[in-house]
Image (cartoon, rainbow, N blue to C red):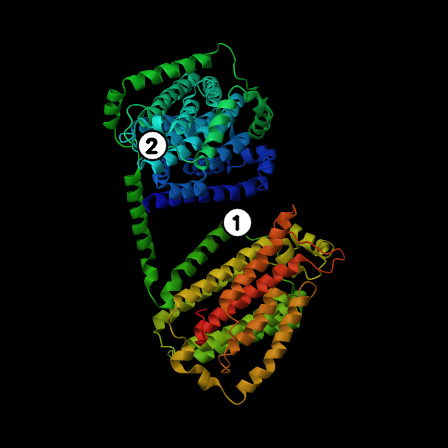
Amino acid sequence: ALPARQALLVTALGGLALLVAVVLLAVTAGTTDIGGVIAARDEVLDSPLAPSVAGLLILAAFTKSAQFPFHFWLPGAMVAVTPVSAYLHAATMVKAGIYLLLRFSAVYAEQPGWSLTLTVVGLVTAVLGALQALREHDLKALLAYSTMSQLGLLVGAIGIGTTVALAAAILHTLAHALFKATLFMLVGVIDREAGSRDIRELGGLRRVMPVTATLTGLAGLSMAGVLPMVGFVSKESLFQGFYGADLFPGSGVLAATLAVTASALTFAYSIRIFYGAFAGPTTQEQLYEPAWPFLAPAAVAAVLGLVLGPAVAVLNPLMRRAVLDAEPWGEPPYFSFWHGLSPELALSALTVSLGLILFAYRAGVEALLQRLPPLGGAVLFERAYQALLRFGELVGRPDLRTAPAPFLARPVLALVALGAVGAVLLGPPDGISLRPEDGPLVWATLLVLVPVVLALVVARTSVAAVVLLGTAGLVVAVWFVLAGAPDVALTLLLVEVLTAVVAAFVLHGLVPYARRSGRGRNVLAAAAAVLAGCAAAGATLALTGRRAPSPAGEHYLHNAESETKGTNVVNTILVDYRGLDTLGESVVLVAVALGVALLMSGTPGPTARGGLAAAAYTEVLGPAYRLLTPAVAALSGYLFLRGHDEPGGGFIAALTAGTAVALAPLAGAPLPRWLSGGPLLACGLVLALAPGLLATATGRPFLTPMFTPGGGFSTALLFDAGVFALVLGLMATVVRRLGGDTGSRTW
């Protein structure tokens, strides 16, 4: 559990940092498209937010690609048993951080802070990871720290920022993928066959597993940067990039020295892998070579690493395009297997020599490394994690009260304070019109609403509070009609009806009268209410005041009919233009239904506890319900079918049908067996996803509507049907739990 928790929390931190960076980039560049951000490079760099964006991008990449000091999660994740570690690898994707840095090099490569941070942290990570790898006995732990070291070399090369260094980083990314994939797969094979990954318990496996030994040797040679593997070409290119660094006087020599140090350590532990597992006397004679299906994937990657070394020139077109994406203004270098005598060749020879020396004196080197402090960092992580939990407990302690007033006071007052600060800093918004020409009907609705709200404040019975709250909602629905928003008005009207029905379930058996509170508490509550009301009114006026339509709104108004074959702009936005948003909200409904089902599982509903249905069933309500249900169902279907052109749609139609579902327990009518949350929610998800998958299968963006040749049918109708089923499924789940009508189903 600890490795999974570390991986989740650290990479989630990076994900949140990346999310904030994307938001800031959208503000500065006006787009979230990477190509658009690169095109707006000058605007991004001239913005005062540029350092913050760079820092957040670096944090996201460092946590994702296990750079010091966020490295500790990677070894724990990779050392887990093979299936679990595979899941963690798939979830974390350590190369995602490398890709992120490569893409944004086009924006920040010439910024000293960016370059220096990446180069220093990358090379430090490379050396520390290689040192730790050399002291490990577990093959998977060794490879994990090796991955950390190789990622450090990549980050350092990206930090150099020259075209040569970026090209070397891209080529080494490919080389690392080939040799590290081979080694991880083969270590899994060794673990399965020998029952151990500890090199102290292995030995002589080359005699019983010759193919595994050969493939491991090829991958190890590529990781060590030895001829004729592709790792040799990429390692020489890295040396060339580091030696050409110009961050400060002498930076090239220093960077090359650290790179050679890390590479020499890499050479030493590469030999250690093969020597520890395959050399020496055979300790387990009963072992045998695994079947080819186990070895074939590793063989493909290992052979590619061998072939692409001498044939590296075939990668030049691909490398050229990738380098131009990372550095659009440079001229990509030409990769070839042999460059003649050069400084980087001398550095490669020095690397091999130092690596051989380290291996030759491995006993003394290992004894020295064992005296060094561990590099794991798990202890520090756990301390920080526990401190964070204690801080969260301290912050949330005041909210543990069950009384609603203290529970709501802090967040409400915090929002008021934030609104006041925002109003002072930003000043009054522009372009707001109070529209005095709206007419007397609008003011009449306000005159009705004010006394209703005042009566709600002083109401002492639960029934009166529910009735007055519903009345206030109905008055607001009338105001929406007068404001020209019939869809919103119809939705609010149905929600008020459903709220009243649910309140009838919940309030049954509770104390019918509210307790009186003291004068001092009333004064404080009134002050908080007035402040919250003023803040809400100000925010509503500032954010949604009567301004001219936005460019997006203008586009929807003028193009909805031609692009979606629908005239109800509200519905076309929900199911045609912004279908992904609607899909996300629909998934939230599924989560709510699951939460209701789980939280109330095994708990009898109010109906079962107090006989609500029997008390409410009268000679009028029961027959009236049976008479009106077909009419409500027909109205629901009518609203669903007309939704693309007139007020209606799947959401409103489901709320209409939901009123009949909600009233059933009050009328003493059991719900049909098929009207259960589980099947409806599953059907709704399938219908909502089907148009998106169909669009993707035909080469269109996800959830792009498709039309029949005559334009009479759109796949958006299927999506709307999915929304209908999801909303109705949520209603059925809530009613079955609150109404006590579970039948043979739990939800």
Q: Residue 460: in sight, yes or no?
A: no
Residue at 40% of width from left, 79% of height from top? 608
Q: In which quarter of the image is residue 433?
A: bottom right
Q: Residue 347: give its label.
A: none
Q: Are marks 1 and 2 in contact (CB under 8 Å)?
A: no
Q: Where is residue 539 in the image (x, y as percent from the top left)?
A: 53, 58
Secondary structure at numbered mark 1: helix
Q: Nearer the viewer, residue 417 or 638?
A: 638
Q: Where is residue 346 in the image (x, y as percent from the top left)?
A: 43, 12
Q: Residues within 10 Å of mark 1 (few under 14, many from 20)?
A: few
Q: Identify residue type, mark 1.
A: Leu
Q: Residue 133: in sight, yes or no?
A: yes
Q: Which of 299 and 133 is in front in this view?
A: 299
Q: Which residue lies furthest to the top in this view?
A: 341
Q: Residue furthest right?
A: 710
Q: Nearer the viewer, mark 1 or mark 2?
A: 2
Asked if 352 appears above or below 213 in the picture, the reply is: above
Q: Residue furthest bottom?
A: 619
Residue at 49% of width from left, 65% of height from top? 678
C-alpha separation, residue under disc 1 versus residue under disc 2: 58 Å
Q: Earlier in the sequence, mark 1 or mark 2?
A: 2
Q: Identify residue type, mark 2.
A: Leu
Residue indicated by mark 1: 426
Q: Residue 139: give its label.
A: 2
Q: Where is residue 396 in the image (x, y as percent from the top left)?
A: 34, 57
Q: How crowded is mark 2: few (under 14 residues within 10 Å), some or many (20 or more)?
A: many
